[in-house]
């Protein structure tokens, strides 16, 4: 019998090497003003050891730094000058490559989503090369690469339904915590007075602005809702209901009209995609009516101000805010007409617009359409549309397949991801969200669904080849999907 090949690089080997290296360097640091460096290195080694031992644990940690970004608001972490998510991403990538499940595989398990994303990022890189300001575009592109890396790490780490389910639990828990912290901050003074109202903020600076916070909340609601609809355990149902209530209230406190519009779209999608449309229409109407009457007056006036489209009617800045989206789109179209192939480059919209098109406009596009037209041109537009269309196609197919097999977990996950895609496109009418992390999370989870589908299909084929009877009937507990 052939011997199992020995693994040369192991977690223990890396740990020993790190300890020896730190021990050798410590005396040099201790006699300088950087005496604390060895202690930081020891902490980093322990942290890295955990990630190398379990890539799934590393993925959980990386998701924390990506979604709620404690490195921007938690005292100890915010004092560290290096962006924390980058070294964690590098450690996690090395961990994935060295882990036994990946190291012993014969070939990479690529899906069409993975290949399309690689092509899309290559097309964006092409536009960066021909950018009017390459340095600025390269900075923006690095952030996009970091999100693309998340896509491939998630796909490499998550291998089965159990890991996928626990990762979704983790995302839901982080989102509920983030929203709860924002509501707490609102009532304790961490808020912003803008557009004539007090508006809730997130704790971080990257996605903590009112409109970005609203986008985070509404993109997360489909996860909670669709899993609640199939969850049978009372404790989970109460947690999900409580989480949805906090997030809806937090969304109101942001005062984001785009966010509220996306929320209405979400309720419409819930009604349309259900087999019980009449019942859901009644429930949604009652719920929205109750929300309206308990909403503080300043937020009612804020949302009513959507109809204030002229400067004469404008009392709260609604007209200027709404018209800026339209102006951004028009400038984007003009940019596309003058530089159609590659656009003017990522991150260059405001400067180019103010310099060449409108001297009063020095800000980003404020719309996904304007951003695509002005910054990445036809090359980026084609890549983006191809990527999103492929996601929609696979999610719709997986939804039909697993719904016909009475597999509520996989079916609802596909439906929630498709709903989030539609919501992101709606949010794109009022915000430049081309490289928001939500696109890449949806893409990563869709790729996981495809890989799980492929592995289960391969298992069925193997069983058939061995002469075993394969049944597509659901098991007795299959209808009781849990988180």
Image (spheres, rainbow, N blue to C red):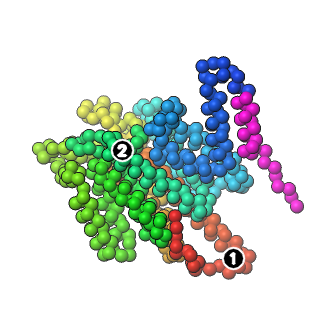
Helix, strand or loop under label 2: helix
In-image side of 415 versus 248 (left or right): right
Foreground: 184 or 155? 184
What residue sits right under mark 1 in the picture?
Answer: 464
Closer-to-camera residue (175/381): 175
Segment colored magenta: 1-23
Q: Spot the residue most to the front.
A: 188
**Residue sitting at x 61%, y 26%:** 36
Q: Residue furthest right?
A: 1
Q: Position of residue 281 (x, y in %)?
A: 30, 71
Q: Which residue is mark 2?
A: 185
How far across and down, in percent of the image, does residue 178 sit? 43, 49
Q: Nearer the viewer, residue 231 or 272?
A: 231
- Image: 480 above or below 350: below
Q: Nearer the viewer, mark 2 or mark 1?
A: 2
Looking at the image, which residue is at 37% across and 56% down? 246
Q: Residue at x 29, y 65 (%)?
A: 287
Q: Secondary structure at mark 1?
A: helix
Tell me, yes or no, whether the highlighted magenta stretch contains residue 421.
no
Looking at the picture, how far across and down is residue 72, in whole percent? 45, 37
Quadrant in which the N terminus is drawn: bottom right
Res 401 visible:
no
């Amino acid at each position: 019998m052939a011997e199992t090949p020995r693994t040369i690089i192991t977690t223990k080997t890396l740990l020993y090497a790190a300890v020896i290296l730190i021990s050798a360097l410590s005396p040099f640091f201790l006699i300088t003003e950087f005496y604390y460096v060895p202690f930081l290195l020891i902490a980093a080694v322990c942290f890295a050891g955990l990630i190398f031992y379990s890539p799934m644990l590393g993925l959980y940690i990386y998701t924390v730094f990506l979604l709620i970004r404690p490195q921007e608001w938690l005292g100890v972490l915010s004092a560290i000058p290096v962006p924390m998510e980058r070294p964690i991403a590098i450690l996690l990538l090395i961990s994935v490559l060295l882990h036994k499940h990946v190291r012993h595989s014969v070939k990479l398990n690529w899906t069409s989503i993975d290949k399309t994303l690689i092509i899309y990022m290559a097309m964006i890189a092409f536009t960066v090369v021909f950018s009017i300001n390459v340095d600025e575009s390269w900075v923006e592109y690095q952030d996009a690469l970091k999100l693309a890396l998340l896509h491939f790490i998630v796909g490499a780490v998550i291998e089965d339904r159990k890991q996928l389910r626990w990762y979704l639990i983790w995302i839901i828990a982080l989102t509920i915590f983030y929203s709860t912290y924002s509501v707490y901050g609102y009532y304790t003074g961490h808020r912003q007075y803008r557009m004539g109202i007090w508006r809730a903020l997130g704790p971080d600076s990257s996605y903590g602005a009112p409109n970005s916070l609203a986008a985070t909340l509404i993109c997360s609601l489909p996860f909670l809702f669709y899993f609640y609809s199939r969850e049978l355990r009372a404790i989970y149902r109460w947690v999900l209901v409580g989480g949805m209530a906090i997030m809806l209230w937090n969304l109101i406190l942001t005062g984001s009209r785009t966010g509220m519009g996306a929320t209405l779209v979400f309720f419409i999608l819930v009604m349309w995609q259900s087999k019980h449309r009449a019942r859901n229409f009644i429930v949604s109407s009652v719920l929205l009516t109750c929300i309206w009457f308990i909403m503080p007056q300043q937020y009612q006036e804020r949302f009513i101000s959507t109809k204030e489209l002229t400067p004469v009617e404008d009392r709260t800045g609604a007209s200027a805010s709404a018209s800026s989206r339209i102006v951004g789109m028009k400038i984007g179209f003009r940019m596309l007409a003058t530089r159609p192939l590659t656009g003017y480059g990522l991150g260059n919209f405001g400067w180019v617009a103010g310099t060449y098109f409108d001297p009063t406009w020095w800000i980003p596009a404020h719309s996904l359409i304007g951003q695509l037209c002005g910054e990445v041109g036809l090359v980026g537009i084609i890549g983006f549309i191809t990527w999103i269309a492929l996601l929609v196609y696979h999610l719709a197919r997986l939804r039909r397949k697993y719904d016909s097999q009475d597999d509520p977990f996989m079916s609802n996950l596909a439906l929630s991801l498709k709903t989030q895609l539609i919501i992101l496109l709606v949010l794109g009418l009022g915000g430049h969200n081309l490289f928001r992390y939500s696109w890449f999370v949806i893409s990563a989870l869709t790729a996981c669904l495809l890989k799980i589908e492929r592995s289960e299909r391969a298992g069925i084929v193997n069983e058939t080849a061995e002469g075993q009877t394969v049944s597509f009937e659901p098991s007795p507990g299959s209808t009781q999907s849990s988180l």
